[in-house]
Image (cartoon, rainbow, N blue to C red):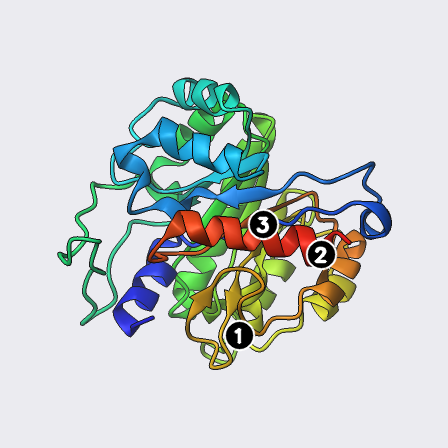
Amino acid sequence: MNNNRRNFLKTAGTLAIGGLALSGKAASLLNFKGKHAVGIQLFTFFNVMDADVKGTLSKVSAAGYKEIESAFSKKGGYYGLKAKEFKAMVNGEGLSWKSHHVLGAPFKLPPGAKMPEGPDGKPIVIPPMANLRDNMQQLVDEAAEGGVKYLVCASTPITSLDEIKLSIDTLNKTSELAKKAGLQFCYHNHDAEFHTVEGKVPYDLFLAETDPKLVKFELDLAWAIKGGKNPVEMFKQNPGRFPLWHVKDLDAARVEILPVGSGTIDFKPIFAAAKSSGMEHFFVEHDMPKDPFASMVSSIGYINKNLIA
């Protein structure tokens, strides 16, 4: 993954992580009844989904996934649809829509960065995106209309302490609105949140300066590991704070994102500690894969064979 792509993902916050299925002995560790549903983050299909939303959802369902988490679409809205329209389409394919990603602040590329290229080799063109800082009530209302349980801030500016403080204020205000709308608000990380900014670690500040009941966290396992963290230790330090997970794999250099089971992350001890994390849903994700459908099949195949048995 090149630096431009990585910077885009960190800024736009449209990454999201993976889902795993558990049953039998593994399920008992999570205190689940029976086999847990496997979810997928639809950003996996960023370059293809807008051309055939229904067809993409159909393939997701056919692969064995049961839950989805939505994210940014080049069509805007919910892949060019209103929330209720998208929900009906998701349900029509035998899927359950659990969560939706939004940006914490207006999108802008870092200085010197360029937009990543799409399948045609040209820079991606994106429409204006609503964000929590400017469109908080709108985004909360739309998610509530769609019937999702979770609204997730995909990313927020953290390059200075002033930005971090403003972001924390946005998270706290959104969490109050989300509660009134019947939603659980969460924050999704990349690796930058674990790096020191003016002597402080942004993720530590997010944990400490938000209400544990109102602001939960969607832990992107791979990005946390890339940031030098051990998810199991994070669960011990903040039990019950991580109801959502993103699951993707990384190569040995912690640079290239891979299908689950194709890289170097050992997921078994992480899932063995899932009960302490408070995890309720998890979503498979592979951002910008060459073949998203092959990737999703590979990931769920590994999960069913190695993380359920």
Q: Look at the numbered discs 2 and 3 and tell me whether their residues touch, using CB distance below 8 Å.
A: no
SS of the residue at dot 1? loop
Write the residue at 79% across / 45% down: 23
Task: Between residue 35 and residue 3, name the one nearer to us.
Answer: 35
Of marks 3 and 1, the one in the foreground:
3
Please name the amino acid that badge 3 sits on. Answer: Ile
Please name the amino acid that badge 1 sits on. Answer: Gly
Query: Image check: 125 left or right of 231?
Result: left
Please name the amino acid that badge 2 sits on. Answer: Leu
For disc 3, the neighbor class at 10 Å (few under 14, some 14 to 19, many from 20) is many
Disc 3 target residue: 300
Query: Image check: 301 left or right of 196?
Result: right
* Image quarter of the N terminus: bottom left
- Give the image quarter of residue 65: top right
Relative vertical location of residue 239 with respect to residue 62 in this rendering, above or below: below
The answer for how far apart the CA atoms under marks 1 and 2 are is: 24 Å
Task: Between residue 256 and residue 202, name the one nearer to us.
Answer: 256
The answer for how far apart the CA atoms under marks 3 and 1 are is: 25 Å
Expressed as whole percent of the image width and height from the top left, the position of residue 242 reads 67, 52
Write the residue at 18% across / 65% down: 114
Query: Image check: 114 left or right of 40?
Result: left
Disc 1 target residue: 227
Across the whole image, how many numbered discs are drawn on residues?
Answer: 3
Mark 1 / mark 2, whichever is N-terminal:
1
